[in-house]
Amino acid sequence: MVQGKTKGLQTKASSSRQAAKAAANPKKGKRYIPPKKTALVKQASMRQSLTAKINKSIEQQMVSAASAGKLTIMKNTADSYAD
């Protein structure tokens, strides 16, 4: 059993370069601190679920509109040939 330090293994020095790089380029965007009070936690979870439901319904409406032919990415070729 080894007692004390071993000769071959050495611990790496902490990389100050990576810490300096992270400090120089902070992440973009708003910082989000989750709520701690129970009422606010409940409110946040409800808001998140409602947002998800709204987004899902908007996506379904877009899919139905696109499949019905109302939405097109490209112009109709028939219009360009008529000129």
Image (tube, rainbow, N blue to C red):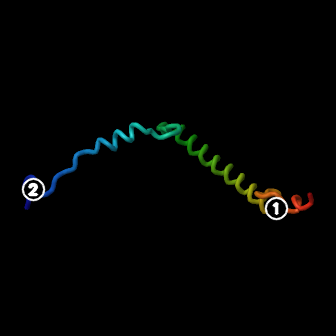
Separation of disc 2 and disc 1 at Cα? 74 Å
Where residue 7 appears, as percent x and y from the top left, is: 9, 56
Q: In this view, does 2 lie to the left or right of 37?
A: left
**Residue behind mark 1:** 68
Is the residue 76 above or below the residue 25 in the image? below
Q: In this view, does 66 lie to the left or right of 8?
A: right
Where residue 56 appears, as percent x and y from the top left, is: 67, 54
Quadrant containing the C terminus in the rendered view? bottom right
> Which residue is rendered at x = 40% and y = 37% of the image?
24
Observer able to see residue 21: yes
Mark 2 or mark 1: which comes first in sequence?
A: 2
Camera-side residue: 9 or 74?
A: 74
Q: Furthest-front residue in view?
A: 83
> Which residue is rendered at x = 64% and y = 47% of the image?
51
**Residue behind mark 2:** 7
Camera-side residue: 67 or 57?
A: 67
Instruction: Return the mark for residue 31.
Output: none
- The image quadrant of residue 18 is top left
**Neighbours of disc 2 within 10 Å: few (<14), some (14-19), many (20+):** few
Q: In this view, does 82 lie to the left or right of 67?
A: right
**Disc 2 vs disc 1: which is toward the camera?**
2
**Neighbours of disc 1 within 10 Å: few (<14), some (14-19), many (20+):** few
User: At numbered mark 2, what does the secondary structure look like: helix, strand or loop?
Assistant: loop
Where residue 11 appears, as percent x and y from the top left, is: 19, 51
> Which residue is rendered at x = 56% and y = 45% of the image?
45
The amino acid sitting under disc 2 is Lys
User: At numbered mark 1, what does the secondary structure look like: helix, strand or loop?
Assistant: helix
